[in-house]
Amino acid sequence: MFGTDGIRGRANKGLLRPESVLRIGRAIGHWLHDAPVPHRALIARDPRRSGDLLDAALSAGMLSEGIEVVDVGMLPTPAAMFLTGTLDAGIGVMLSASHNPAPDNGLKLFTPCGNKLSDSDQAKIEMLAQGPAGEGVDAQDLGLRRSEPAALLDYLEALCARHSGLQLTGRRIWIDCAHGATSVTAAEVLRRLGAEVKGFADTPQPDAINRGCGATAPAALAARVQPGELGLCFDGDGDRVMLIDERGTVRDGDDVLYVIATSRMLQQQLTPGRIVGTVMTNFGLERALQAAGIGLVRVPVGDRAIAACLNSQGLTLGGEPSGHIIFPEFLAAGDGLLTALEVLAVLEQRGTSLAELTQGWQRSPQVLINVPVGSQPDLTGIPAVCAVESSVQAELEGRGRLVLRYSGTEPLCRVMVEAESDELAQSQAERMAACLRENL
């Protein structure tokens, strides 16, 4: 039921049919009663058309179990995580499919501390959702629902307070909100800090979210950014960001990690000298960080794995190429707007441009091919796949690496190859992808 980032799929189908979501809401209610947390749930959403449907079904399920529901309206996932704690909710639920197309939707669940639910808690909720529905509470014990749309101001003020010394006067910044949830936050915060803001795809559009815009399609904004300007491309729910530098070049999460990690190292603010990346982090970044005296700890893809490693090892910076960057002292998950402010603060401190700061590392040639799949069988149980994988690994030994993994949010198997040349990376990635197409 749960993938790498909650429950996700086609709206009004499968687990996202209203009757299924209602059962999930009741299961969350049961789980809250057994957990040492307030019997209160926060619900937020991005602007997708199906948000109303899921909100109604999920709320009904929780209310029927006597859970108070606090509706904070349309806002980004990181804002919902932040407010789950400030509003004393026992659980937060974000209705979003993040970077997926508009017909998709999903449920992201998180704790009052902003952490994604643990595997064991997800398993409990899944078991409850699949078991007998029960009768619910008596009428006099039903939960109540209330709206707190003004709560978003607490999140905005917290961001501005963290960067109260940041002066953006005279800086022109383009924002691409992917027609999603950062439409209600990004321009407001940047203007409060003095920036001149220009917008693209910066209004909520239920049926256009992520379509040809946002973090998954940054070229659309890059074509608009003029020399000397900056661009920020968020995804539909605002937990990731891609940047456009002053020369119109797209900069991803690896660039952000390099800029922030090396700047903190220079200021002796990167303790204990390590950051967290994923198996998808470019090998060129790892070598550049090593040259700067910074270690890279690799974990599986997903901000949940990054957050867990940051917490267990006491580290202060982690992220992945997709633009999820975590600053655990503020929030235990990716926050696109916070990431943008952190980069802008570095630019102000260093007195230079993003284009200049990213010149210190060279990206290893990398090819990523997404192979559509109907199911996700264990790849180690498919002899033909194992044979080609071993052959590709042998071909790349000492010259690159291969990563095979299923997407946790889409019906895809991802093939990533890094190598010493574009030609080698492309040929081996296509070879592996062709094998997967034949056998999956």
Image (tube, rainbow, N blue to C red):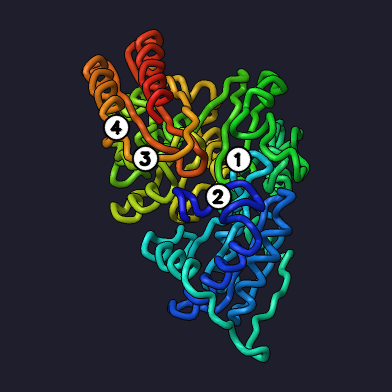
Q: Amino acid at mark 2?
A: Arg
Q: Which mark is residue 350?
A: none
- SS for dot 3: loop
Q: Position of residue 16 (x, y in %)?
A: 61, 55
Q: Residue 71: percent from the left, percent from the top?
A: 69, 67
Q: Residue at label 4?
A: 382
Q: Which residue is mark 3?
A: 377
Q: CA distance from mark 3 to mark 1?
A: 23 Å
Q: CA distance from mark 4 to mark 3?
A: 8 Å
Q: Name the front one of labels 1 and 4.
A: 4
Q: Are marks 4 and 3 in contact (CB under 8 Å)?
A: yes
Q: Earlier in the sequence, mark 1 or mark 4?
A: 1
Quadrant in the picture for residue 383 = top left
- Residue located beneath label 2 in the image: 8
Mark 2 vs mark 1, CA separation in Å: 9 Å
Identify the residue position indicated by label 1 in the image.
100
Of the pair 376 and 40, the residue shown nearer to us: 376
The residues bearing labels 1 and 4 have C-alpha atoms spaced at a distance of 29 Å
Mark nearer the N terminus (4 vs 2):
2
Residue at coordinates 50% horizontally, 54% vertically from top-left? 6
Q: Is residue 388 left or right of residue 366?
A: left
Answer yes or no: do the residues labelled 4 and 2 have beta carbons within 8 Å? no
